[in-house]
Amino acid sequence: MSDVTRLSENEDTLPKVLLRNAQVRPGKPAYREKDYGIWQTYTWAETAEEVKALSLGFKSLGLERGDKVAIIGDNRPHLYWVFLAVEALGGVAVPLFQDSAADDMKYVLEHAGVKYAVAENQEQVDKLFECRDAVPSLSKIVYYFTRGMRHYSDPDLHSYTDVQAMGRELAGKQPALYEEEIAKGSADDISLMAYTSGTTGNPKGVIHTHRNILVSCQQIIEVEGLSENEDTLNYLPMAWVGDHFYFAQGLVAGFRVNCPESGETVMGDLRELGPTYYFAPPVTFETMLTDVQIRMEDAGGVKRGLFNYFMGVAKKVGVDLLEGRPVGFLDRIKYFLGDILVYGPMKDNLGLTRVRKAYTGGAPMGPDTFSF
């Protein structure tokens, strides 16, 4: 682990790590988001300023240590920043699945005792309003996208930018307040309550401390040799703990977290970005394999013949080559040609050319998919 990814004893919470990143790599890209077809980039220094304004805005709204804050929406840099802004004040982030029905959302909000909620858009705000009467603890709702929100006039409803404006005003009055609040945090403070999907009953709230998250991230970074030069594509639900650890690894190692434009553009954004570190459930890899097979069925005879022949070579020796086992000279030549004619172009088309490390989890993966 390099000096720029190793944490000191004092960097024992996620907000403290963010402050470290803003100091040691202020101009490096931290978060990127595809918006209207263009990648928008935020440096670590810019991210730290955005989080500070949001955190002090929550302070102005009355957020206290231990308060639970629900986060609902697609993968957006601004929603990832909510985690850090809440944790800087000693609050606990409670991400919810964005496709949850109002009744399912209601159970988690009530069970966790959520006091604040941050919603991506009007759809999520409407679901929160539907839940509000049954969740007496819910006092404030913050929304990010303003589209469709013009005629909402609820006194407990605030826009994301207005909350940040409140935070900047408070920072002007108390310049040291934000750093003082972060300094109060410790490794054993609760950072996250991640709820299970509830497939065998009601969802269970699983508690994660800062220590739990940071130690796990450092271990993966060290074992896999991850650095601040990685690129990831974060498109999995933010309510899933796997995505949260993926996001936290970016914070600890200082690498770039990239968010797709929408759920519908993920595969196109993947091809354009070409991540170096990729995390996907088995179904995503299975979909890739199925798409390739379907396209090969529709391809011309020569292309289909080349594909089938060299995939046969790959099945015979590919795993041996990856694992460093001895392979005959002729088979190596065949594999080299296959890389030029089939494997390389296919990886490029799938957006996997730059991938150095790939993870999967959440369900079993079939051996055919794994080998492919």
Image: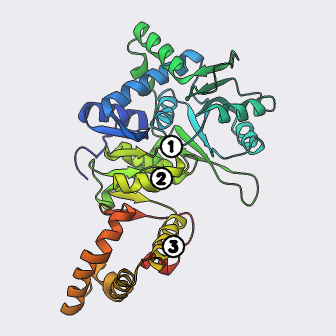
Residue at 73%, 28% in the rendered image: 137
Residue at 45%, 56% in the rendered image: 267
Alpha-carbon span between mark 1 and mark 3: 26 Å
Question: Which comes before the other along the chain, label 3 or label 2?
Answer: 2
Residue at 69%, 16% in the rendered image: 153
Q: Where is residue 361? Give x, y as percent.
A: 51, 64
Image: 355 above or below 6: below
Which numbered mark, 1 or 3, is in the foreground of this view?
Answer: 3
User: Which residue in the structure is indicated by mark 2?
Assistant: 266
Q: Residues within 10 Å of mark 1 (few under 14, many from 20)?
A: many
Question: Which comes before the other along the chain, label 1 or label 2?
Answer: 1
In the image: residue 33, left or right of residue 364: left
Whether residues under marks 3 and 2 lie with C-beta atoms below 8 angstroms apart, the answer is: no
User: Which residue in the structure is indicated by mark 1?
Assistant: 75
Which coloring applies here?
Answer: rainbow
Classify the position of the C terminus by image quarter.
bottom left
Question: Which comes before the other along the chain, label 1 or label 3?
Answer: 1
Q: Where is residue 356? Give x, y as percent.
A: 31, 63
Q: Secondary structure at mark 2?
A: helix
| Three-letter residue code for mark 1 | Asn
Residue 192 in view here: yes
Which numbered mark, 1 or 2, is in the foreground of this view?
Answer: 2
Whether residues under marks 1 and 2 lie with C-beta atoms below 8 angstroms apart, the answer is: no
| Three-letter residue code for mark 3 | Thr
User: Which residue in the structure is indicated by mark 3?
Assistant: 290
Nearer-the-camera pick, 84 or 306 = 306
In the image: residue 17, left or right of residue 167: left
Residue 328 in view here: no
Image: 311 above or below 106: below
| Three-letter residue code for mark 2 | Val
Q: Residues within 10 Å of mark 3 (few under 14, many from 20)?
A: few
Q: How many marks?
A: 3
